[in-house]
Image (cartoon, helix red, strand yellow):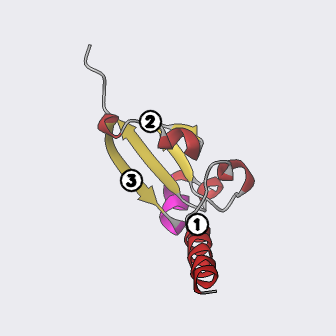
Amino acid sequence: MKKILLLLVFTTNLLLLQAQVPDHSNAAKSDPSLPTYLVDGVEMPYAKVLKINTALIESMNVYKGPDAIAKFGNKYKHGVVLVKLKKSKK
């Protein structure tokens, strides 16, 4: 009986932890309240942003609320994550 109770508690905790992690895989298209990701000025889905090699990122800036609207317009009222990549050296 103790093993079943322990397993139940463990499973419940695991499910609660997973529920707290946001899933942005398809969220960019289905949830308009998420921020927009701009990589070098081009809108990009969150799933693609995750695949960017962090060594290639020069800077990231986050604009929220009134700051995002003032800088980018009302379309971006839910925020903008601006990602600037390093210039490639040829």
- Can you give x and y, in whole percent of width and height, for residue 79 in the image? 54, 59
Q: In this image, 79 relative to 84: left or right?
A: right
For mark 1, does the 10 Å Cα neighbourhood hold few (<14), some (14 to 19), or many (20 or more) residues?
A: few
Task: Say which residue appears at 60% left-offset and 76% top-offset.
Answer: 7
Report the residue at 30% width, 37% height from top: 55
- Whole-percent x and y of residue 39? 47, 38
Vertical side of 61 occupied by 15: above or below: below
Pick the front one: 18 or 38: 18
Q: Extreme left residue here?
A: 89
Q: Is residue 31 left or right of residue 83?
A: right
Q: Amino acid at mark 1?
A: Gln
Q: Residue at x 53, y 47 (%)?
A: 37
Of the numbered discs 2 and 3, the one sitting upstream in the chain is: 2
Q: Which residue is mark 3?
A: 61
Where 59 sits versus 8, above or below? above
Q: Is residue 2 above or below residue 67?
A: below
Which segment did they paint magenta? Answer: 65-71
Which kind of residue does numbered mark 3 sit on? Answer: Asn
Q: Is residue 69 magenta?
A: yes
Q: Secondary structure at mark 3?
A: strand
**Residue type at the position of mark 2:** Asp
In 3D space, how far apart are the residues under numbered discs 3 and 1 (Cα atoms)?
Answer: 28 Å
Dot 1 or dot 2: first in sequence order is 1
Q: Position of residue 19 (x, y in %)?
A: 62, 69
Asked if marks 2 and 3 touch (Cβ < 8 Å), the reply is: no
- Judging depth in this view, the residue of 87 and 68 nearest the camera is 87
Residue that carries the numbered disc 2 in the rendered image: 40
Q: Hey, which quadrant is residue 35 in on the image?
A: bottom right
- From the image, give the main secondary structure of the stretch colored magenta: helix
| Residue 87 among those drawn in magenta | no
Q: Earlier in the sequence, mark 3 or mark 1?
A: 1
The residue pinned by badge 1 equals 18
